[in-house]
Image: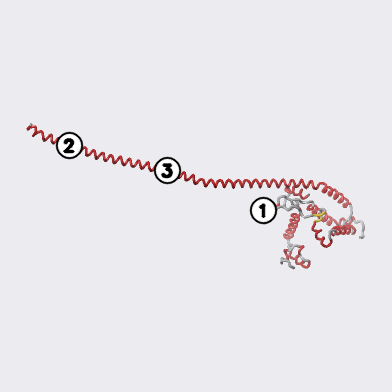
Amino acid sequence: MADKPVALAQKRLMDVKLGQLPSWFGTRDFTPNGLLGSVRGGYERYYNKYINVKKGGIGGVAMFLAGYIALSYLWEYDHIKHDRWRKYH
Amino acid sequence: MLSRLVLVSGHTLKNSGSFGACLVQASRSFHQSSQSLAPVPPLPEKGGKVRHGIFPEELFTLLYPKTGVTGPYMLGTGLLLYMLSKEIYVINHETFAAASIGAVVIYGVKKFGPSVATFADKINEDKVAKAQEVKDQAMASLAQGIEDEKKEQWRVEGRHMLFDAKRNNVAMLLETNYRERLHMVTNEVKKRLDYQVELQNLHRRMEQEHMVNWVEQSVIKSITPQQVQRI
């Protein structure tokens, strides 16, 4: 309430209140260029936080690999469903 | 630690799309962004904190006010049990393979992590030292250039004295030349005037002698008819 008035479009996702979410979504740039820009922005943020440091740890690469594992499991889930042990859960 | 290895080998990978990292952040900024980042800010010392290798610390700080320290672990356990019981995560042959690989990887990381880290750090430090050396050499040569320039400027001040001496020399030469010619002129004029004086003397002497001769001649002539008779 005492925040200085920042335009809704420039707020980051975590600062947006729940009620403003649809309107915030409306201000996002969904053109291909905009999507590419947001992907590049996310990549740069991750890169600058975890990889491009003097003493990086295993976290940067490990998180990326874990995300890749999870995503590939998700894409393969329809195939893995057939390996289930029980029919009813 | 793996990131450090990636950093070391990164200069062979292309910058734009791949996961490779380059030690010099500035080259990436030059090619891609239009901002001017000079001087380039130094790299941060440590990356974002990550717990157990795959969970970023932000998750723990997010849950700490509401659930305390064990919150995320409880969340993790609950999620795991839910996925196992509802068979969202299915246990099959891949699970066994993943477990074996995971065990080997974790053992390798725990055992060889620090040594690889120090090795990569050393390589990085060598690169930085080389760059620093180049920079120091460049600065030293530039400072030397400044010193030489100052010396040259000091020398330029001395050139005024050189030109003054040369100007004095030339003035003296001119003066001597002038005086020589003055002497010559005086001598020549004096010679001409002496000549005229001698000429006039000669004239008067000749007139005197001639008159004397003439008077003598006329006296002798006038004596001869008369005095000869008297004597």
Q: Quadrant of the N terminus of chain A?
A: bottom right
Q: Position of residue B132 (x, y in %)?
A: 68, 47
The residue indicated by pointer 2 is: B212
Q: Cα distance, mark 3 to mark 1?
A: 61 Å
The residue indicated by pointer 3 is: B172
Near mark 1 (Cα within 10 A), the count class, few <14, some 14-19 or many ≥20, is: few
Q: Position of residue A36 (x, y in %)?
A: 73, 58
Residue that sits furthest to the top in the current view: B231
Residue at the spot 54% in from the left edge and 47% down from the top edge: B154
- Kind of residue at badge 1: Pro
Q: Position of residue A68 (x, y in %)?
A: 81, 54
Q: Cα distance, mark 1 to mark 2?
A: 119 Å
The residue marked by circle 1 belongs to what chain?
B
Q: Position of residue B8 (x, y in %)?
A: 74, 47
Q: Which badge, 3 or 1, is on the more N-terminal residue?
A: 1
**In the rendered image, is residue B88 in sight?**
no
Have a look at marks 3 and 1 and say if they share a chain. yes
Residue that sits furthest to the front in the current view: B231
In the picture, measured across the screen, residue B79 lies left or right of residue B195, that is right
Contact (CB < 8 A) between labels 1 and 2? no
Q: Which badge, 1 or 2, is on the more N-terminal residue?
A: 1
The residue indicated by pointer 1 is: B39
